[in-house]
Amino acid sequence: MSQITTRFEVVYRENNLSDNDYYVYGSGGGSLDILQFIEENGLRAPIAVIDREAKKTPIDVLNAYELKNVDHPVVVSSISFYGEIKHALVKHNEQFKSKLIPLMPYSENVTNRLYISESAWNEYQSLSESAYRGIHNWNGSQLQNQGFYISKSGEDFAHGFRLLCEKLPEQVQLIDSSQYDFDYFSNALGEQNTDLKRLEVTPAAQLAIEDFLEKHYEEIAQQLGSHWKVVNCRITKLAKVLNSNVGSNKLHLDNMPKPVKKILLYITPPSADTGSTMIQLEDGSQITVEGEAGTFLLFQNSRLQHRGLSTDKLNRLVCELTIATNQYKDTQVRTVGLVSEYPYKPWQRCGAYKVNLGGGANFNGENWICYDECDGANIQPISFTPKTILPNLDNSCSLVYSSHFFEHIDHETLTNLLTESWRILQPDGDLLIKIPDFDSARTAGLNGNMQYFNQFSQSKELLKNWQKHGVDPKCALSHAANVITSFWNSDYGHLYKDQASARSGYCGPVRLTSEEYAEIFKIESINEISKILTQKVRDSEKDFQFNHQNAWTKLEFINLVSSFGFELVSTSYELIEYAFPDVPDFEAHKPISNYYYFKKIANTNKGKS
């Protein structure tokens, strides 16, 4: 039994479908497996199969969107796409909400692995595609339009790779062969396909595949509309069997997230006579891949149904590459357990020492090193300057975290800390940053939304002091300016150290009129607004200290950090909170904060901004 039929047997029993009418949603491989399982075991058949459109082949399918009344339960045959299917159906007809039955337990929160997988992959695909397509002026591709793309590698490569693969040893297929691939979804071993053997991907084979990846990287990226990487690699040797209908030789979909696709590199020449792959297009027509050795098929394996075509003429050799969108070029060949399919998230936490930058005297967490200029029992004192060297070895830390600190330091000190963070982080290490939501502050200022700034809890005495110094406390732009750039003078005393003493002097935004603020805030670049406001403070004040002196739009900040050898993997609070349960007080200031999760890119040319 496959994973899908195993789960169907459970939901069939738990929902008493033997005594009730029900639908099956989906017309792909999962649905076909379920129908075959029902027939073989004499179970009650669904009253109909439904999908996003009506079909006649390979089975009769009704259009789900034409159902006026959803009177019966609907078993969704897809595991990976349940959330996406649910949202589409419920948006069309609210009745579906109470009728859908997932094959796997599913809930729309971070306690559910499938929800996390869908959310993380969807966000990461959007980030990857936006970054690539903006730079490369991408205007679409055959892969996007039709779901597949066929090309070929050079004859010399194909000949040499075939000779190499014909000498590769077989891998032993064990049920626990992916035991250590904790971060991958597994394809549970059910129906054994004795018609194929997995070959060992030796170092020599890896080098040959990396050569192929390097030569065709840009060609494939153009089809994808994004950078990409290999998340799994297999080399398969198929037995001489004519018209096999076992395992991958059955018409099926792979039920993977949309950002995950496959490349089939044909080591032996593909054709209907010598063995190949047939793909069924969305209009019902079929295409068989044909060509010379070295031909390869890039296709959306969870969009187009497909099947292997077996032959008794030769032992067909195929290199199967599971690939996924990425934010930078990566030609590393990754091999995982035989029953491992794809990573359940596009990113994974890295584990070891954790560093907090500018966490304050009250920051307290087990196994954390907290650097700050203030005193505290949990603090390792340090002075933050453009020349600061963090007292950590290269590649020694798993996480660098900073919360509402980067806006307090000047640009040169910040860029130095980004360089140092990259140095001390392990390859694939995590950089987690929380800073004020400057975009929302600027928007609230321009819209006169004083309610937004009530979250900052400015005292009446402080606002009266603004009025006294010519700053209108009833003007939303004054408050927006205070979020972006603020300072205190010597008469006021240190904002964070002298909290018990009575206050005089001034603490707030640069002393300008509302009209002057309005003119400055016409500028869309928040970093430019910050530079103007900080310069006005320097020009008008003598003895002062900055509170905030650095600010950015969301995109400006992402571009800045990325230029130091990091890739952005998420800005979703929900996903980041789930991934970092060990960060103290992570939710503090959430309504007025932006969260950024970056990962270190190893062996990259870091920029200086």
Image (cartoon, rainbow, N blue to C red):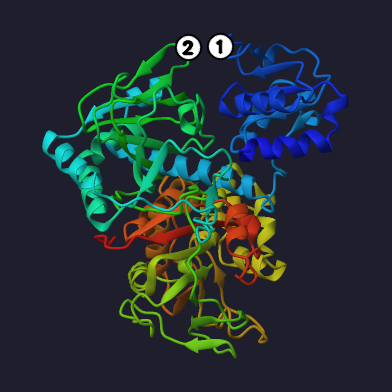
Residue nearer the viewer, 162 or 465: 162
Which residue in the structure is indicated by mark 1? 57
In the image, residue 81 sits, relative to residue 330, either above or below, namely: above
- The amino acid beneath tag 1 is Thr
Residue nearer the viewer, 100 or 537: 100
Q: Which mark is residue 284?
A: 2
Q: Position of residue 371 (x, y in %)?
A: 48, 82
In the image, residue 107 sits, relative to residue 250, either above or below, namely: below
Residue 102 seen by the camera: no
Quadrant in the picture for residue 84: top right
Quadrant in the picture for residue 531: bottom left
Image point 39% across, 71% down: which residue? 425
Q: Quadrant of the C terminus?
A: bottom left
Q: Position of residue 243 (x, y in %)?
A: 42, 22
Under tag 2, what secondary structure? loop
Do the residues under discs 2 and 1 have CB atoms within 8 angstroms?
yes
- Left or right of 40? Residue 480 is left
Can you tell which of label 2 and label 1 is closer to the viewer?
A: 1
Residue lying farthest to the top in this orientation: 56
Residue nearer the viewer, 514 or 160: 160
